[in-house]
Image (tube, grey):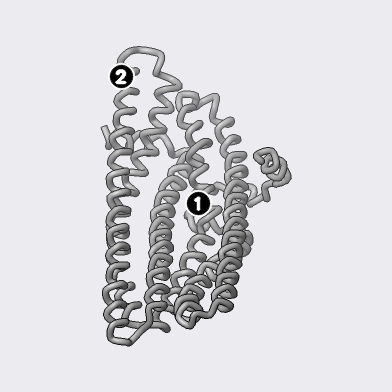
Amino acid sequence: MSGVFATIARRFTPFEPTADVMRPGEKFPGFVRRASGMHQVYVSVIAILVALANFIPIDLQRRIVDVAIADKNVRALLMLGGLYLAAILLHAGLKYALIVYQGWVGESVVKTARDQLAVVATQRSARDHARSGQTAGIIGNEIDYVGAFVGTSISECVVNVTIMISIISYMIYMQPVIALVSGVSLLPQILLALYMQKDLNTLVERQVALVRKLGNQAVNSFASHSTKRRAAFRTIRSIFSNRIEFYLLRFGLKTSMNVANAMGSLMVLIVGGYLVIRGQTTIGTIVAFISGFQRLSEPTGELLDFYRDYSQAKVQFRMIIQWVDGDHPAQTEHSAHREN
């Protein structure tokens, strides 16, 4: 199977973004638009189709419970089940196409950016050999992260916003009271994520600076005097501590969101169950709302992830541009010394 995918992959060729994809002084949103061009529009169209295909099963679940099962109609049950299966396959196919397209766009940008950064690195190699470890990190992992974000940036936002609008509109149409309860339960997640993102950005910037510093130490100092080796080990320890702090903050936020999502589903059951008892809604509607809320919490979380990834990619892009512009030594050393 891997051989088939390898054959297909060899048929892909990167598109050519603007020649100088990394321009000193350019803002990150402008870089994303210019580097990916019209491909972001095409990817966004597929993203909207993915979102609409993801919405279809929600109403089909309600109809299966309230129409086919309630009326004991086997023919309707089989027909709706067939439509449900078709919707699942359609969504899976569109999402696979979207992910491959996003990956192709991102890797094309990375390839072009690496071509440019390699030229810059070659021009500096004679006079700036002492920072070759930093150069390897920039051309390697750092530009990978930025390019991956370009591939998914706008389309991921489009697909999740479309899903949220579709589900919220459907919920309001079907049962405004439960829709209000669902919406209120999501609000703390958004506020908490926005509040904590500044600290995450600081940790990302510090991590990039420390890894660059370690690259320079490993290439130029690690095999020399024991004092320099100890300095490299201190940098490694600082990277470890910074990464652990990042994990504690990021996954603490994710845990809080998971609790909020669970509380939201519980509120839908309680409020919806009360309305069913009072005869103001149906069991099928509650089933659809629980499914809808779960689908709503997913794009909400992904939008928050998008905001976090955007903030982190913007930090790394700024630091790469500073390196391209020749302003890297003071900036990275300053950031690294702040940790020490």
- Relative to 61, is 244 above or below? above
Measure the C-alpha gap from mark 1 to mark 2: 36 Å
- Relative to 228, is 74 above or below? below
Identify the residue at horizontal 49%, vertical 58% (top origin).
29
Identify the residue at horizontal 58%, vertical 77% (top origin).
75
- Where residue 89 sits, quadrant-wise, is bottom right
- Relative to 45, is 120 above or below? above
**Residue underneath mark 1:** 149
Identify the residue at horizontal 66%, vertical 41% (top origin).
1
**Residue underneath mark 2:** 230
Identify the residue at horizontal 29%, vertical 53% (top origin).
255
**Foreground pick, 90 / 21:** 90
**Foreground pick, 140 / 161:** 161
- Relative to 328, is 82 above or below? below
Left or right position of 322 against 123: left
Q: Which amino acid does label 2 sit on?
A: Arg
Q: Position of residue 319 (x, y in %)?
A: 43, 43
Mark 1 and mark 2 lie on one chain; the one further toward the N terminus is: 1
- Where residue 328 sits, quadrant-wise, is top left
SS for callout 2: helix
Q: Position of residue 309 (x, y in %)?
A: 42, 52
Q: Is residue 130 among what the camera can see?
A: yes
